[in-house]
Amino acid sequence: MFEGSASVIGRSIDGAFLVVTGICVLLFAIIVAFMLYFLFRYRRGRNAVPEDIEGNTPLEISFLVASIALVVFMFFVGLGGYTALREETPPDAVTVKAHAAQWHWSFEYPGGLRSDVLNVPLGRAVKVVLDSKDVIHGFYIPAFRVKQDAVPGSVKTTWFKADSAGTYDLFCTQYCGLGHSGMITKVEVMPGDKFDEWAKAGAVEKAAAAGAPGAAARGKELYESKGCIGCHSTDGAALVGPTWKGMYGSRVKVTTGGVEREVTADDEYIHRSEFDPGADIVVGFPPVMPSQKGVLTEDDVDSLIEYMKTLR
Ligand code: CUA
């Protein structure tokens, strides 16, 4: 009927869902059965003259009481699933920060390591601390039955404990603009020791990259952390915005003030595009890029340019 739950909380939510659905199906069957029976029993051929029936007080009261009892019962069954979701996070949980931005997810682990796929250890509670750079996004992992909005200016948390290794989908469930449908990533559930290994290897790699001179490495980090990655690919694929692969130094067709022209993607053009993205719109792409004023400095843009130069 639906994909099996891969988290501990998910089971209690599935339980509540099944009980409520079961009751609804049962009531539906009973009502339809009575309807068909009455249709046959009181058909015109047998009862040509209708009879006036007065109410039946005991029957009416018992219907009323039974209905209320049933609805209250379903409320408490649902409450069980809800409190499981909202319960206090276990104190030994691994904390992962989830940064939402138009239009991508970026996950930050203890030690500052970042990735755009959510890596979590199997059988260990994971606390997700959500924030958003721009608009409301929805953090949703169907297989875990976990859903929480990321709200700008506010910190929201949720948690789960994955109990089945594998790869699962992670969606954004709030319509957050043009690239919303592309705001998809994966959750990678790996055995605890493998997760520790991954985190350690990543931290070493990060330290090495930080130690290495060169603006290109810094540019790559900015590309991932400042959200450029959400709209600009580095492999030639056209996303919401044009790819960065081979862009630097190339001739680009743009619309400037309604007039089409061709420019060279040089330092000046890239600086202008970062801080005044509406000035030149690349032909074939929508004018949706937000200005990076206050997000990137001129130095940051120079680092990004160095990174772009490596994307041949
Ligand atoms: Cu973010 Cu939809």
Image (cartoon, rainbow, N blue to C red):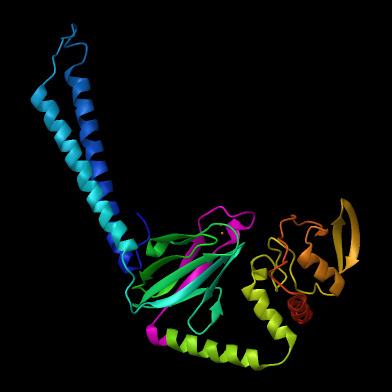
Question: Left or right: 42 with respect to 110?
Answer: left
Image coordinates for residue 193, horizontal then vertical, percent: 39, 87
Image coordinates for residue 132, horizontal then vertical, percent: 55, 64
Q: Is residue 57 above or below residue 209?
A: above
- Magenta segment: does it hold 172? yes
Question: Left or right: 4 with respect to 141?
Answer: left
Displayed quadrant of residue 221? bottom right
Q: Quadrant of the N terminus?
A: bottom left
- The residue closer to the viewer here, 178 or 284, is 178
Q: Is residue 140 above or below residue 211?
A: above
Residue shown at the point (19%, 25%) measured from the top left = 37
Question: Left or right: 195 with respect to 217?
Answer: left
What segment carries the magenta color? 168-194
Residue shown at the point (27%, 61%) measured from the top left = 12
Q: Is residue 244 above or below residue 72?
A: below
The single residue placed furthest to the left in the displayed view is 58
Image coordinates for residue 228, horizontal then vertical, percent: 68, 69
- Magenta segment: does it hold 81? no
Whether residue 275 is visible here, answered yes or no, is yes
Whether residue 250 is visible here, answered yes or no, is no
Question: Left or right: 220 with respect to 4?
Answer: right
